[in-house]
Image: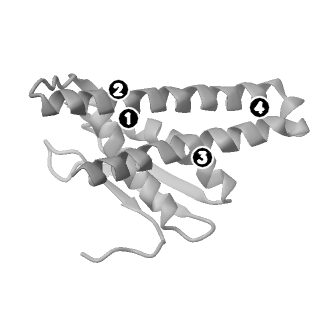
């Protein structure tokens, strides 16, 4: 269990670190430095990914509390479409760096639920990280939210990578 936990946490930190690295490389470019708008964009990416890593550290602490029997889920009314869109923003720079593309559609009309944002965000990020990780050089990722029934929300993540057995 400890090895699984360490592997999962390593996975959770790899994407923000890679994204920060790409953003720093971009900021070193004279073309980016000449544009205040681009500079602000990449500084915002670094700040957001740093916040994401802090959230992961908090997640480790929450898991420690869970083992002690003291986990408190922070459930709040959340728009899942917006949360998914936020997750896509986290991987967009990596996909762009690999000259890939993301197609997203938010077809779910009913998209609010009472969830722990951090845990649901981690689920989204794991799906998206894997879609990027197991895609060929130029990833093409399709993401779609929808309502399979009137009271359910669902998301499909499709890539054109190596696939997995069912």
Q: Quadrant of residue 130?
A: bottom left
Query: Of callouts 2 and 1, which one flags the residue occurring earlier in the amino acid sequence?
Result: 2
**At 28% from the left edge and 36% from the top edge, which residue is drawn?**
119
Which of the two marks, 4 or 3, is nearer to us in this view? 3
Residue lying at 69% horizontally and 29% vertically, measured from the top left: 41
Q: Earlier in the sequence, mark 3 or mark 2?
A: 3
- Closest to the observer, 86 or 2: 2
Q: Earlier in the sequence, mark 2 or mark 4?
A: 4
Q: Residues within 10 Å of mark 1 (few under 14, many from 20)?
A: some
Spatial CA span between label 1 and label 4: 24 Å
Element marked by disc 1: helix
Q: Position of residue 74 (x, y in %)?
A: 22, 22
Q: Nearer the viewer, mark 2 or mark 1?
A: 2
Q: Earlier in the sequence, mark 1 or mark 4?
A: 4
Q: Secondary structure at mark 4?
A: helix
Local secondary structure at mark 2: helix
Q: Nearer the viewer, mark 3 or mark 1?
A: 3
Q: How many marks?
A: 4
- Residue 106 seen in the figure: no
Q: CA distance from mark 2 to mark 4?
A: 30 Å
Residue where numbered disc 2 is placed:
58
Circle 1 sits on which residue?
83
Query: Which residue is denoted by mark 4 in the rendering?
Result: 38
Tell me the residue that label 3 is attached to: 18
């Amino acid at each position: 269990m400890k090895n699984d936990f360490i592997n999962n946490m390593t996975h959770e930190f790899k994407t923000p670190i890679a994204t920060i690295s790409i953003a720093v490389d971009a900021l070193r470019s004279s073309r980016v430095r000449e544009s205040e708008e681009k500079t602000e964009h990449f500084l915002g990416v670094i700040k957001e990914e740093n916040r994401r890593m802090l959230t992961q550290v908090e997640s480790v602490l929450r898991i420690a509390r869970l083992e002690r029997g003291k986990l408190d889920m922070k459930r709040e009314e959340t728009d899942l479409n917006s949360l998914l869109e936020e997750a896509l923003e986290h991987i967009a720079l990596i996909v762009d760096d690999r000259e890939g593309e993301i197609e997203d559609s938010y077809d779910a009309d009913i998209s609010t639920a009472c969830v722990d944002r951090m845990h649901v965000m981690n689920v989204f990020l794991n799906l998206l990280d894997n879609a990027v990780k197991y895609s060929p050089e130029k990833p093409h990722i399709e993401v779609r939210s929808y309502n399979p029934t009137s009271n359910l929300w669902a998301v499909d993540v499709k890539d054109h990578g190596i696939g997995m057995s069912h």
